[in-house]
């Protein structure tokens, strides 16, 4: 099954947006399989964003992600990676459509409140990076027959 790694960044936690952000994914009908509040060590943030290592903003990005606790989540469902990216909206919140998380709740790229994996491969890679095996739950939501035929 397709999985994605969603993370509420430190600004989302500090601004009290944890509940509303989780609700967006929950209401859509995806399945939550992992959830924790976590103070991210620098090395993990660097590994997570290693593709951006050469960017000028990389040190600032690592400072930002490690500046306070984040909420780590694993979500599962058909098409969850692309759909979650749509729910999140464009990287620059000023370009993100109203109705998306960034479009509704943020104003700057450097404080864009949430992360979502950009491919199914990266979804698996990132979930393995941020969670230990015992932290993930395999379960069947009671509402499943009312979500998928
Ligand atoms: P993520 O879901 O967090 O991976 O965002 P994204 O996939 O929409 O964007 P990308 O992977 O290209 O960049 C990762 C993160 O780096 C962004 O979400 C921003 O937090 C940060 N970032 C990207 N570009 C810039 C920039 O030009 N300036 C600053 N300050 N931060 C940036
Ligand atoms: Mg990205």
Image (cartoon, grey):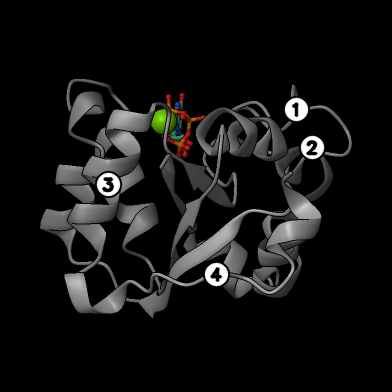
Quickly name the residue at label 3.
Answer: 126
Label 3, label 1: how far apart the Cα atoms are: 24 Å
User: Looking at the picture, how far across and down is residue 22, in whole percent?
Assistant: 66, 65
In the drawing, what numbered circle is on residue 96? 1
Give whichever of discs 3 and 1 has the lower sequence position: 1
In the drawing, what numbered circle is on residue 103? 2
Quadrant of image for the C terminus: top right
User: Looking at the picture, how far across and down is residue 46, in whole percent?
Assistant: 17, 45
Label 3, label 2: how far apart the Cα atoms are: 24 Å
Within 10 Å of disc 1 (Cα), the crowding (few <14, some 14-19, many 20+) is: many
In the drawing, what numbered circle is on residue 120? none
User: So how many labels did they put on this image?
Assistant: 4
Q: Is mark 3 within 8 Å of ligand 1?
A: no
Residue at image coords 63%, 27%: 92
In the drawing, what numbered circle is on residue 140? 4
Residue at image coords 25%, 26%: 52
Give whichever of discs 1 and 2 has the lower sequence position: 1
Hey, which residue is sitting farthest left in the picture? 43
User: Looking at the picture, how far across and down is residue 113, in whole percent?
Assistant: 59, 52
Give whichever of discs 1 and 4 has the lower sequence position: 1
Q: Is residue 39 left or right of residue 81?
A: left
């Amino acid at each position: 099954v397709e999985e994605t790694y969603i993370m509420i960044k430190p600004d989302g936690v500090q601004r009290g947006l944890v509940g509303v952000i989780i609700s967006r994914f929950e209401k859509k009908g995806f399945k939550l399989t992992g959830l924790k509040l976590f103070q991210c060590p620098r090395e993990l943030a660097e590994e997570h964003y290693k593709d951006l290592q050469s960017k000028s903003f990389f040190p600032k990005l690592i400072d930002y992600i490690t500046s306070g606790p984040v909420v780590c989540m694993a979500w599962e469902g058909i098409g969850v990676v692309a759909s979650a990216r749509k729910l999140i909206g464009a990287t620059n919140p000023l370009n993100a459509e109203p109705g998306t998380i960034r479009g509704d709740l943020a104003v700057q790229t450097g404080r864009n409140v949430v992360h979502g994996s950009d491919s199914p491969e990266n979804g698996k890679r990132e979930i393995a990076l941020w969670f230990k095996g015992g932290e993930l739950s395999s379960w069947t939501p009671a509402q499943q027959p009312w979500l998928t035929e």
